[in-house]
Image (spheres, grey):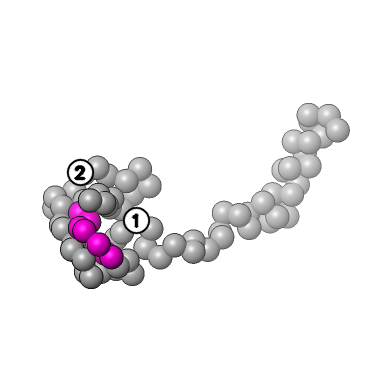
Amino acid sequence: MTRRGLKTFLMGMCALGICSSYAVAENLVLDPQFTSEGTPAGSQTFYKEDTIGPWLVKDGSVDLNGGGFQSSPAGGNSVDLE
C-alpha cells in the first residue's frame, strides 16, 4: 500500500468512527487529577488512614499540591508521596 493509500485508509477509518473509540475510552483510575478535594492554595497534608477522594493513605503521609506548586501537566492537582 502506498503512503497516500494508507493515509486515505486511516482517514476513512476515522470518519467511520473506528478511531474515535480510543478517544472516549473510560478512565479506570478514579480521580486521576486529584480534584475531588478541591485545589489547595499551596499544599495540604494527609496522613495514614486519611482519604483523598477515592484514594486511601495507607502509610506515611501524602501532600496534595495545588495553586501552581508542582502542577500536573494534564491539569488538576499533583501529589507528593512521602
The residue at 21%/44% (across/down) is: 68
Q: Is residue 61 magenta?
A: yes
The residue labelled by disc 1 is 33
The residue labelled by disc 2 is 69
Give left or right: position of 15 versus 35.
right
Mark 2: secondary structure: loop
Residue toward you, 27 or 50: 50
The residue at 38%/47% (across/down) is: 74
The label number, if any, that marks residue 7 in the structure image: none
Quarter of the figure with residue 31: bottom left
Disc on the earlier residue, 2 or 1: 1
Q: Specify whether residue 79 is in view.
A: yes
Highlighted magenta segment, given as a residue range: 57-64
Mark 1: secondary structure: loop
- Tell me if mark 1 has few (under 14), some (14-19) or many (20+) residues whose alpha carbon lies within 10 angstroms of its own: some
| Residue at the top extreme, as displayed | 3
User: Looking at numbered disc 2 in the image, what kind of residue is underneath it?
Assistant: Phe
- Tell me if mark 2 has few (under 14), some (14-19) or many (20+) residues whose alpha carbon lies within 10 angstroms of its own: some
The residue at 21%/58% (across/down) is: 60
Residue 62: x, y in percent? 22, 56
User: Looking at numbered disc 1 in the image, what kind of residue is underneath it?
Assistant: Gln
Residue 67: x, y in percent? 19, 48
The residue at 40%/65% (across/down) is: 30
Q: Specify whether residue 39 is in view.
A: no
Give left or right: position of 65 versus 11.
left
Q: Is residue 10 above or below residue 39?
A: above
